[in-house]
Amino acid sequence: MQALRKDSQKRRAKILAVDDDPGLLRLLTIRLRSENYEVEAVQSAAEALAAMARFRPDLVITDLRMDQMDGIGLLKELQARWPGLKVILLTAHGTIPDAVRATQSGAFSFMTKPVEKQELLEQVQKALKISGFPTVDEEWRADVITRSPLMEEKLGQAHLVAGTDARVLLTGDAGVGKKLLGRAIHRASTRRTGPFLVISCSEVAESELETDLFGYDNGAVPGAARAQRGLLQAAEGGTVVLEEISDLPVSLQAKLVRALQENRVRPAGTDETQPVNARIMATTRQDLTQLMVQGKFREDLYYRLNTVHIDIPALSRRREDIPLLVAHFLEQIAVETGVRKIYSPEAVEFLATAEWPGNVRQLQAVVRQNATIAQTAVISAEIAEQAVGAASGLPSFDAARDEFTRNYLVQILQITGGNVSQAARLAKRNRTDFYKLLSRHQLTPDEFKAR
């Protein structure tokens, strides 16, 4: 297990230095390395952008005047791709007005050439301190088991945005680890000592979801239940993850927009608003832009949640992670049961090349099943193949739930002869919610009425 985790000791800060003058670049590199910084030196903006995913710097120092793309262009690209990354500009005296404008656009600061060593180190220390580097170590990402460059790029984005309070939209197929990455961002943030709360927008009835999110206050009603804080209030100083935000009812989408806009919520049963001091993240496996076109998701909510977008790749795009994940899951099982098992080389090869529509979640389920039924300490390729074959024949949880819901609705409409009011009462849902269910599953009550 320890071999799979990153060293929890604080690492050296990484600085990307960009200058098309080899002599100045060499001097800058020597000065920074002498202070124990890890430095990557490149001579153009294009090389800098290419190095970002691989090197994952904590700070960028770039010359303002360069061919092809200058320092301002590089700054804009970095801001778009890696929000929160601090950038220091180096400028000659004649370009100071440009540098001032750049700092107004988001650059951390600028320094004029020739740069004094002490001034350089002071600016670097200030930039790193503001970015949160001195207080954040590699433990924040310890649960994300990966060696994939794709995932490293996503973790780099996550670490950068963790130093801000920007809202984050995490997208990707079911089972890729959206909530896990959300928790990693929380652990790397200044809010890490606060609560981390998750609420599913798809598994709770609309009325319950409203209460869970925004709270209620029936204090004015004699004998009523006591006031309850919603998650947006209960997560004070922490983080709230809205899981599968695409399933949030449209009526609650409007209320959430107001809460995000005002940083206040209005609990049900009261006209008073209460402050919200929680970072908001959202996850979805659906294409929200398509839902907006269909009128099922509010455009203003999309843009308020999508300050930073991190799309997590499917397991099929990072197969190099499969052996690591398998070993990690086996270690977890060994700790839980006291029995240690391993896969044969042929079994590992099979798992690394199999299709995983359920992604990491499906892989974990298969490993647990294999470890349970294997009679020996070595799990054979045959056992792995049987489990993957059987699993691939099963519908996903979401598909099975949708099928059950549709069959239930058909049955209840048949019993009531298409009478929606009666059917809603039997289902213990109000008419509005019941009509939404019928629409979602493309059922028309008239089809069940007696001819």
Image (cartoon, grey):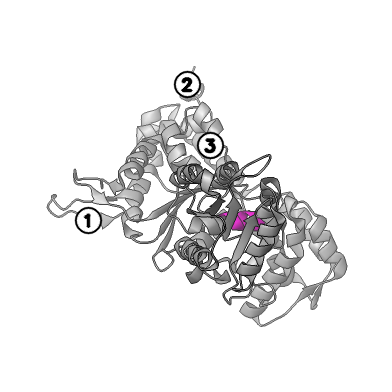
**Where does label 1 land, which residue?**
227
* Relative depth, front residue between 159 and 360: 159
**Image: 277 above or below 78:** below
How crowded pointer 1 is (Cα within 10 Å; few <14, some 14-19, many 20+) is rated as some
Q: Distance of mark 3 from mark 1, alpha carbons?
A: 34 Å
Kind of residue indicated by mark 2: Asp
Q: Earlier in the sequence, mark 3 or mark 2?
A: 3
* 3 and 1 marks in contact (CB < 8 Å): no
Answer left or right for 313 relative to 211: right
The chief SS type of the magenta part is: helix
Magenta stretch, residue numbers: 152-157
Instruction: Residue 361: tell me if it is visible.
Output: no
Give how far across and how far down residue 424 sits, in percent: 38, 35
Kind of residue indicated by mark 3: Leu
Q: Earlier in the sequence, mark 3 or mark 1?
A: 1
Residue at (73%, 67%) from the top-left corner?
324
Kind of residue indicated by mark 1: Ala
Residue at (71%, 56%) from the top-left corner?
22
**Where does label 3 land, which residue?**
288
**Where does label 2 land, which residue?**
446
Furthest residue in direction top, as rendered: 451
Give how far across and how far down residue 276 sits, in percent: 31, 53
* 2 and 1 marks in contact (CB < 8 Å): no
Dot 3: element: helix
Give how far across and how far down residue 248 sits, in percent: 44, 41
